[in-house]
Structures are given as C-alpha cells and as structure tokens.
Image: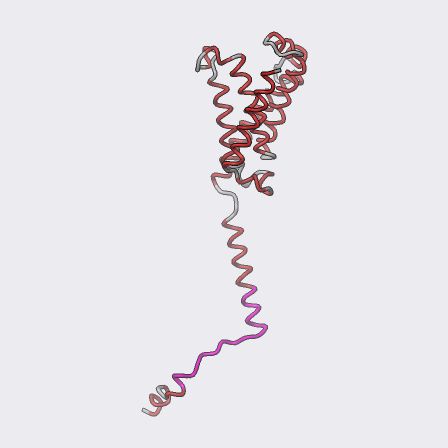
Amino acid sequence: MSIKRILNHPALSARPVTRPTGPHTNTGTAAGNTAATAATAATASATAADCGLLLLRLTFGLLMAGHGAQKLFGLFGGHGLTATGKGFAALGYHPGKLFAAMCGLSEFLGGLGLAVGLLTPLAAAALIGVMINAMATVTGAHGLWDTDGGVEYNVCITVVALAVAAIGPGRLAVDRFFRWGTGGWPQAAFALGLGGLGAAITLSL
C-alpha cells in the first residue's frame, strides 16, 4: 500500500521527465544522421530503369556512332568520306564532302554522347538534325515503311533520341552530375529545337 502511495504522489507524477544531454547524446544523433544518409544513398542507387536506359543508350548510341564511322573512316563496310561526299553532292549538298563530314560527325559524336550519357540533349539534337535532313531529302518521298525506302528508320531514331533527352540518361551516365542529367521538358525542347534549326540551316544552304 505504501508503494502505491509513493508512486501516485502528486509531486512525482507532476515532475517533468528530463532527457540526458551531453556528448553521448550528440554521438547518438550523429550516428542517426549517418545511418539516414546511408539509407538515402542506398535508395538512390541504380534502379532497373537506370539499367534499362543504359542498355538502350549503349545499343542505340554505339550503332549510330558506327554509322558515322562508316561515313567518316570507311569502317564496318562503309564507303568512307570521299565516296560518301559524292553521294551527298548527288543529293544537292555542295560541297558534298563537307556535308558528308558534318553528317558523319553528327552521327559519330552524337551516338557516342548518348552511349556514355554525356551532354545528352546536345547529342540527341545532333542525331535529330541528321534524321530531319534525311527525311526531307531522301526518304520523305517514299512513304512510311523502310521496305519502300520510307521514313520509318529515320522516325524511330528521332523519337528514341528525343525520348532519351526528355527522360534523362539515368544514373549510369556522366550527365548524372549535371542539372540537365535528369531530363525534362527544357531538355527535350532544346534537343528538338536545336536539331530542327540545324536541319533548316543545312537545307537552306
């Protein structure tokens, strides 16, 4: 009975509970912050979407770089710059070799940029500009399907490049350290706008 009286004593029940302070408390807080930081870093690690974007960028980008290498260096069964330049001259691009070099460099550097995720909006713009030119001068007159020489192939490349610029290259990319590495409407607009402007200037020359 005396124990119950002591526990229910008003002075004891009204006494505020104090928490210990001092170096031990600070150490506990620091440990908690460290654990929270580690948890955040773990959450921010590469996801399946990042790996999927890496697979898409590597496949698409390296193949486009290969197309550029065919034109520039004659690799992978390509004709090289001189022969490609003659083909461009036949399409009305003069001097043909200069325009062939511009096209080859756009494909080569744009493809490599997408593959490693470096300057993604600019790399996408380079490929989009080349594809718009191809549609305007070669494939546009042959309808949609590639079997008829149509725009199917060019449209697919344009859409993939634009989509990567809009989505962003993912965490497994060099651009993850830059503000444009997250993608977005401005990045997509930049890629499409610059690609279209470059194509319009080239077509007007």
Q: Residue furthest front?
A: 204
51 shown above or below 36 = above
* Nearer-the-camera pick, 135 or 62: 135
Region of the chain picked out in magenta, as a range:
12-30
94 left or right, relative to 52: right
Q: Residue at x 54, y 31 (%)?
A: 57
Q: Quadrant of the N terminus?
A: bottom left
170 shown above or below 36 = above
126 shown above or below 17 = above
* Nearer-the-camera pick, 102 or 201: 201
* Nearer-the-camera pick, 145 or 25: 145
Q: Quadrant of the C terminus?
A: top right
Q: Residue furthest bottom?
A: 2
Q: Residue at x 60, y 43 (%)?
A: 177
Q: Residue at x 57, y 20 (%)?
A: 200
180 left or right, relative to 9: right
Question: Which x, y percent locates residue 104?
Answer: 63, 20
Question: Which x, y percent locates residue 10?
Answer: 37, 87
Question: Which x, y percent locates residue 99?
Answer: 64, 16
In reply to whether residue 154 is colored magenta, the answer given is no
Q: Residue furthest left?
A: 1
Question: Which x, y percent locates residue 29?
Answer: 54, 66
In reply to whether residue 15 is colored magenta, the answer given is yes
